[in-house]
Image: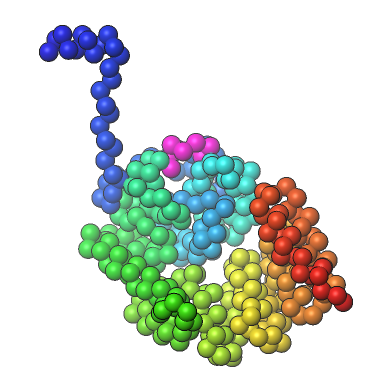
Amino acid sequence: MRKLLVLAALVGFVAPAPAQEKLKVGDKAPPVKATKWLQGKEVTEFAAGKTYVMEFWATWCGPCIVMMPHMGELQTQYKDKVTFIGFSAKDPNNSLEKVQALVEKRGPKLGYTFAYADDRETYDAWMKAAQRNGIPCCFVVGNDGKIAYIGHPMYLDVVLPKVVAGKWAAADNEGIEAIEKEVNAVFASLRPAAPGQQPDPEVFLTKLAEFEKKNPLLAGIPYFNGPRVSSLLKAKKTDEAKTAIEALIAKGTKTSDHTLLLMAASVARSPDAKGDKALLALSMKAAEGALKIAGDKEWQVMLALAEAHFANGDKAKAKEFGAKTVALTEKESAGLKQFVENQVKKFEDKKD
């Protein structure tokens, strides 16, 4: 045995490192190491008796941005009982400059803590260790400093009441898994029942209503908004669709959520709207509301205004905002520039 050890030393043998155990519910929460705390107080430790939500996101992640306003609402609801941390780590498309710009613009209204790391240490200690590959993903740290929940933040309305009260149990995680299957079933109803068939909008609306009746705390899941209105339009329930769009515009305006307004603007001028003048007016209202909130430096807002003007018959304005959209993407990726140029090309092709 001694000879083997000597030989191993001579050839530089290194024993393989033990495999890292998976981070799971019930484990002590790893530390948080950030390069810069962009908003809120630095979290140096998970204090006993308090709940934390550690949510991983990136500027390029659309679903992450969609969830932010609801996270802000939850922070307001739970005040000092829960600390929400929006944690973003560096990657090729997620620089400090991009994250900081978004937080500076939207952070004050959202009202929760934001941190950024220029390395992947914390990301790996949480996400990679838990074998989680997709974002947004959140970890709820309970009053005992241990992880109570790992999963999508859309389910926090069900998770947080029990965690804060110290009543969250292992069986509750199984309950979330069951709810997740229900959500997937609702979205699956948007797909055709068979190849060549069109999905039945009434099926989705029925399944959504059943889900929300069974899970009232989750009736506000943001990802239901677009499909709900689209399905109402497809089912020729135009008045209900208008009411739903008006509600989205009111909420987006109140919460300064320009992404919600952009979605409302898009669905109100979609082919399913069939050129309804009242819907097209709502599309313009939503796009103009997004402009008031986000300003004129975001290409998505400029494109929404161009599309709204075009749908409402103002081709000159459509060309004007289309040109502004193209100008705003000069420093963006070649793929994005090409996408925008293709989108605005139809404004130029149409004769006045």
Residue found at the far right of this picture:
352
**Residue 335 appears in the rendering:** yes
Asked if residue 118 is among those painted magenta in the image, a careful observer would answer yes
Tell me: 324 left or right of 60: right
In-front residue for pair 150/227: 227
Q: Residue 159 in the image: x percent, y percent?
A: 34, 63
Asked if residue 195 is among those painted magenta in the image, a careful observer would answer no
Q: Residue at x 38, y 50 (%)?
A: 132
Q: Quadrant of the C terminus?
A: bottom right
Q: Residue at x 33, y 80 (%)?
A: 214
Which of the 4 image quadrants contains residue 158?
Answer: bottom left
Figure coloring: rainbow
Q: Residue 104 in the image: x percent, y percent?
A: 63, 51
Q: Residue 201 in the image: x percent, y percent?
A: 48, 84
Which of the 4 image quadrants contains residue 302?
Answer: bottom right
Residue found at the far front of this picture:
196
Q: Residue at x 39, y 81 (%)?
A: 207
Tell me: 292 left or right of 86: right
Measured along the vertical axis of the image, is residue 4 above or below residue 204? above
Q: Residue at x 79, y 80 (%)?
A: 313
In-front residue for pair 194/53: 194
Magenta range: 117-123
In-front residue for pair 251/342: 342
**Residue 52 appears in the rendering:** no
Measured along the vertical axis of the image, is residue 95 above or below residue 165? above
